[in-house]
Amino acid sequence: MQIADAPGRGAPGTGERPIGAWVDEMLATGYAGWIALEYLSDTADPFAWINEGIRA
């Protein structure tokens, strides 16, 4: 599974998509594969959304 938010292929939590709910649903239905982040970022810390407590 590859994730990016939309519009604009942003980091999780920066767009309109319920990425957290989608990941929760996939895990609840038995998905045990990789989850890859595939988004664009122009910030100094492309993982800042994790540290800021944004729920994807």
Image (tube, grey):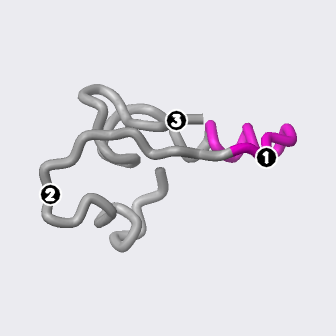
**Horizontal and vertical percent for residue 23?**
64, 43
Q: Which residue lies furthest to the top in this view?
A: 7
Among the two numbered marks 3 and 2 on one chain, the one whose residue lies closer to the N terminus: 3
The range drawn in magenta is 22-33
Q: Quadrant of residue 53?
A: bottom left
Q: Mark 1 highlights which residue?
A: 32
Identity, as a three-letter code, of the amino acid under mark 2: Thr
Identity, as a three-letter code, of the amino acid under mark 3: Gln
SS for callout 2? loop
SS for callout 1? loop
Among the two numbered marks 1 and 3 on one chain, the one whose residue lies closer to the N terminus: 3
Nearer the observer, 14 or 43: 43
Q: Mark 2 highlights which residue?
A: 43
Circle number at residue 53: none
Among the two numbered marks 2 and 1 on one chain, the one whose residue lies closer to the N terminus: 1
Residue 29 part of the magenta segment: yes
The structure residue drawn at horizontal position 33% and vertical position 63%, both measured from the top left corner, is: 47
Alpha carbons under labels 3 and 2: distance apart:
20 Å
